[in-house]
Image (cartoon, rainbow, N blue to C red):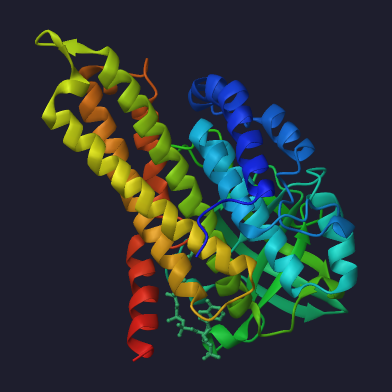
Amino acid sequence: MDFNLTEEQQMVRDMCRKFADNELAPAAEHYDRTHEFPWDHVKKLGEMGMLGVVYPEEYNGSGMDYLSYAIAVEELSRGCATSGVIVSAHNSLCLSPIYYFGNEEQKKKYLSKLCTGEWLGCFGITEPDAGSDAAGTKTTAEFKNGKWVLNGTKNFITNGGVANVAVVIAVTEKGIGHKGLSMFIVESDTPGYSVGKTEDKLGICASSTTELIFDNCEVPEENLLGKKGDGFKIAMHTLDGGRVGIAAQALGIAQAAMDASVTYAKERKQFNQSLSNMQAIQWMIADMATEIEAARMLTYRAAFYIGRGERRHHSKDAAMAKLYASEASHRATHTAIQIFGGYGYIKEYPVERYYRDSRITEIYEGTSEIQRLVIASNVINSY
Ligand code: CAA
């Protein structure tokens, strides 16, 4: 077992850390307050190769390994969790299903624009009545006159308002549960495709979270992704990778909370001594540091195995990484506010934002309860 990062992984970490320190973190408060989509950051992330991290160079990707991708999301999220999720949802949820399940024509057509950031992507699975129960999708796709006609509404779609392409799941055969679901690549300028309500959220405020509405939206036959009836499996495979991205996002937020806490604890004096000299604070920092390292190990290990194409325990590894990292991030950001005291509760310091940003990592791409279901079923079935 070798815990050292490769030269390429160190290079990605250093590049993203520098970008996070110099550009993302200084602007994070602005974007949190204004809710403006950070187009300037997204453009630069495209130039840095972070919008097609693991995809081959022939499709304009950066051709890096999956661990490099997780490290990138971690470091970017340390500076700004909004940028972290934009990168994660784009790479993991839109590009991944096209790369793994698309045919050569689809890959050439879509990945080459998505990898550079010329186009942004999103993933349409969640619906008002199909959240944790992803197979409860109501959106339909009927084959008529050589086209797939989509009708229905998706909600809580990350990158929804800015995406040029959505990968969307819909019912192609009713009454047979998840086997009747298929996946489609839908361009946002297709007639009948529109963006509905934009959500006003607790955290990751500048990311675009919207409804997507399909009203007799005619999708070309060739935009079916994979085979008819494979939609649910494509979605689950996609979420296995996506959950590692969210684990990395949670990890980055937790690390930011610890960095701020230690710096503050060393500077802040009460009772004629630094907070960092007080055992109560030291214990908080010890717990934060230990949990962050444990979260990092789980996240990197899950990413490492995806990179090697080893899928045997992959759903379990990804679910464990997301479950632990998101809950550790919740605890770390909670503790950070405690260490800052009253200053942690006001917007002048970033820790209240970390706390708000962290909360969603326990919910999207499968709640903690769904991760526990996935882990338990994998463990029980392995005996
Ligand atoms: N890879 C491939 N196939 C898989 C799989 C995986 N990881 N997991 C399950 N499958 C297959 C099974 O083998 C099974 O196939 P067969 O019928 O051929 O045997 C089929 O899928 C059904 O499996 P289950 O019976 O286990 O499915 P289920 O209905 O019990 O549900 C679930 C499983 C884990 C609860 C699933 O519905 C789930 O993950 N729900 C959470 C949804 C979710 O994460 N939503 C997030 C939305 S995206 C988002 O949040 C984006 C964002 O904003 C950033």
Depth check, front residue: 296 or 144: 296
Image position of 291 (left or right of 19): left
Q: Is residue 205 visible?
A: no
The percent coordinates of residue 308 (x first, y second) are: 63, 70
The percent coordinates of residue 321 (x first, y second) are: 42, 60
The total of numbered circles placed on residues is: 0
Image position of 323 (left or right of 336): right
The percent coordinates of residue 332 (x first, y second) are: 30, 40
Q: Is residue 112 visible?
A: yes
Quadrant location of the C terminus? bottom left
The percent coordinates of residue 355 (x first, y second) are: 34, 36
Q: Residue at x 28, y 31 (%)?
A: 336
Which residue reaches farthest left? 271
Q: Residue at x 62, y 23 (%)?
A: 23
Image position of 83 (left or right of 346): right
Q: Quadrant of residue 16?
A: top right
Q: Quadrant of residue 271?
A: top left
Q: Residue at x 69, y 63 (%)?
A: 96
Compared with residue 123, is residue 146 higher up or lower down, i.e. above or below? below
